[in-house]
């Protein structure tokens, strides 16, 4: 499935609810899902529930798609134009390792 197909699927499933909720409240839901993912990842790697983490990641993608639909942003174009190469060093693969936080 292409990113654009996923975004269209989310539009078909949820645009009526997303429009009622609005941009700001949809963004709040995205933030909540980020918190839930962070909660899943607070353990050492051998104790992380990968199924639960995967579900939180799926939720995050769904909420990002909902936001993009409300803002009429083409996610696939945005992602591919920004991340075709590393946006910082303009290389593929990235050679920014000297500046890792
Ligand atoms: Zn880089």
Image (cartoon, rainbow, N blue to C red):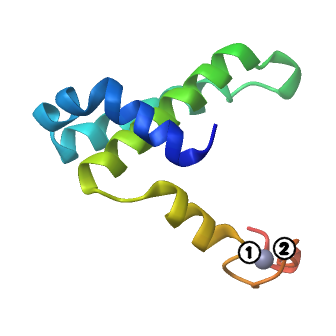
Task: Judge whether 35 appears above or below 93 on screen.
Answer: above
Residue 26 in percent (x, y) is at: 26, 38
Check disc 1: other Cα within 10 Å, few if <14, some if 14-19, many if 20+. Answer: some
Q: Are marks 1 and 2 in contact (CB under 8 Å)?
A: yes
Q: Earlier in the sequence, mark 1 or mark 2?
A: 1
In which quadrant of this rendering is ligand 1 seen?
bottom right
Q: Position of residue 89 (x, y in %)?
A: 76, 85
Query: What residue lies at 66% left-to-right and 24% top-to-bottom?
Result: 54
Mark 2 is surrounded, within 10 Å at the Cα level, by few (under 14), some (14 to 19) or many (20 or more) other residues, namely: few
Residue beneath label 1, please? 86
Please state the horizontal and vertical placement of residue 86, each as a whole percent of the image: 73, 75
Count the labels in the image: 2
Q: CA distance from mark 1 to mark 2?
A: 5 Å
Q: Position of residue 75 (x, y in %)?
A: 47, 55
Nearest to the observer: residue 101 or residue 53 = 53
Q: Residue drawn at (84%, 73%), measured in percent from left and top?
A: 94
Which residue lies most toward the bottom here? 89
Disc 2 marks which residue? 94
State the residue at coordinates (59%, 20%): 55
Callout 1: SS: loop
Q: Is mark 2 within 8 Å of ligand 1?
A: yes
User: Do we see residue 80 in this rendering?
Assistant: yes
What numbered label is drawn on residue 53?
none
Give the side of residue 61 with respect to residue 66, left or right: right
The residue that appears at 74% across and 24% down in the rendered structure is 43
């Amino acid at each position: 499935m292409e990113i654009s197909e996923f975004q269209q699927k989310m539009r078909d499933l949820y645009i009526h609810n997303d429009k009622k909720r609005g941009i700001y409240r949809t963004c709040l839901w995205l933030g909540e899902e980020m918190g839930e993912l962070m909660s899943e990842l607070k353990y050492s790697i051998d104790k992380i529930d990968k199924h639960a983490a995967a579900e939180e990641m799926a939720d995050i993608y769904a909420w990002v798609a909902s936001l993009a639909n409300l803002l009429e942003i083409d996610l696939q174009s945005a992602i591919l134009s920004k991340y075709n190469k590393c946006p910082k060093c303009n290389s593929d693969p990235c050679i920014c390792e000297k500046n890792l936080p």
